[in-house]
Amino acid sequence: MSRTGFVLLVLIMGALTYSLLQSMLAPALPQIQTEIGASADATSWLMTGYLLCASVTTPILGRLGDMYGKKRLFVFTIGMLAVGSLVCALADSVGLMIIGRVIQGFGGAVFPLSFGIVRDEFPPERRAGAIGLMSAIMGIGGGIGIVVTGPIMDHLSYHWLFWIPMVTCLVTAVASWFLIPDSPVRVKARIHWLGGALMSLGLVGVMLALSKGESWGWGSVNTIGLFVAGFVFLGLWVFAESRAAEPLVDMRVMRLRGVWATNLGGLLVGFSMMAGMLLVPRFLQMPESTGYGFGTTVTVSGLYVLPQAFAMLLIGPMAGVIDKRFGSKLAMVAGCVLMAAGFVFLATLHTSGWHILVAMFVFGIGIGLAMSAMANLIVGAVPVEQTGIATGINTIARTVGMSCASAISTTLLTANPGPGGLPAERGFVLTFVCAAVAAVVALGVTFVVPSRAKPGARPIA
């Protein structure tokens, strides 16, 4: 294997571990809540704390990677994943587990740092394919995480949801230190701490409101207050960054069509992706007595997600060929069309197992194309010294979209109760339709993106 092959393998290991940790916990939350004797609200913080930390740290660590070396920050990020996994594996209380999950949130920077390393180390002809494969890993890992959770919970315990990733993180961290070269591209700058603080406060406000809005009430003072405060801080962040001599995020770069449009598309794609990962297993696990559910176990419902992961595994390595022949914009268009088609099919037909399998395969191809294209569009639209922060912002856009999907899907299911207090079929159908609409809007946004981004383009005023 070539040197770049070993580098790509290490990056894939890190990205796959983070993606697994992002998805494995969700199906296991009810059982973990029972075993540790925690309330539903306290247990929900296992997901909320993780997402909040990832939202705040991802762009900052991406920028630090641009400044001090992407290899160093990649090793640090994987190390934090390992530490957080160790804390969670040893935890027998919800408080300690929440601390571990917050530490794991530092792993969100794995993707922007990986994209930066690929841009630094790979020849141009291999760059698009490697970035496409890395992007697909997010969805592949998410699908695999849902599949393996059931067997681990059935035959081991929730502790092994963290012991296994911890070992993988340790191996990845050591391999990263020895196999990834030191970053040749570094920015001589200082961190704009005011910008970082304002961005962090804004993201925490918005993400916390999205995460807790259903339990607090969308019209409650707490929820509305957090939304208002979050958007005010984000507005102040943009104002401060626009006037800073050395901004954390160069707003001239963010104003590039290839950047802001792709970030908006990323938010919408993240919405659709999360809706599929959350809803399909839950739909399948609904009792047959509901008239629509399949009554499957967590393990069996996870198997229905495998076509999505398989489709993404097929598409990811082809990103380079697709980019060279058709361009990443066309790949993004095709991805959005297929995502919408998958959800329309699912909203219309969902009474047989093959309906679910076909929809997930079509959706998987679409999400694989869209995710691969987004990363390549962002990397091709910004200067090389802005790679870490730009891809970090795109990662956060997807995370916000995923949080919106979680919040809206929960609200729609709760607002459409069926017999016995379980969600009615209408709630699932409405959420599938919302995910399809998000993909269609992402399709419209994609047409704003320039057809061919110029690699290394300089920021424009």
Image (cartoon, rainbow, N blue to C red):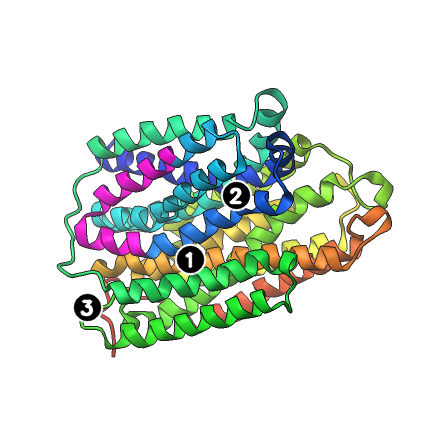
Residue 377, given in percent of the width and then of the height, sits at: 36, 61
Task: Name the amino acid, label 1.
Answer: Ile
In this view, 47 is above or below 385: above
* Secondary structure that dominates the magenta span: helix
Please name the residue shown 65% across and 30% down the image. Answer: 299
Mark carried by residue 396: 1
Q: Where does label 3 land, which residue?
A: 246
Q: Where does label 2 land, which residue?
A: 46
Asked where in the image residue 261 lies, by quadrant, the reply is bottom left
Of the numbered discs 1 and 2, the one sitting upstream in the chain is 2
Front-most of residues 374 and 169 = 169
**Residue interval drawn in magenta:** 60-83
Of the numbered discs 3 and 1, the one sitting upstream in the chain is 3
Q: CA distance from mark 3 to mark 1?
A: 21 Å
Badge 1 element: helix
Where does the N terminus fall, quadrant-wise?
Answer: top left
Please name the residue shown 38% across and 44% down the image. Answer: 107
Mark carried by residue 162: none
Front tag of 3 and 1? 3
Of the numbered discs 2 and 3, the one sitting upstream in the chain is 2
Residue 310, given in percent of the width and then of the height, sits at: 54, 38
Badge 2 element: helix
Q: Is residue 71 magenta?
A: yes
Please name the residue shown 25% across and 79% down the image. Answer: 461
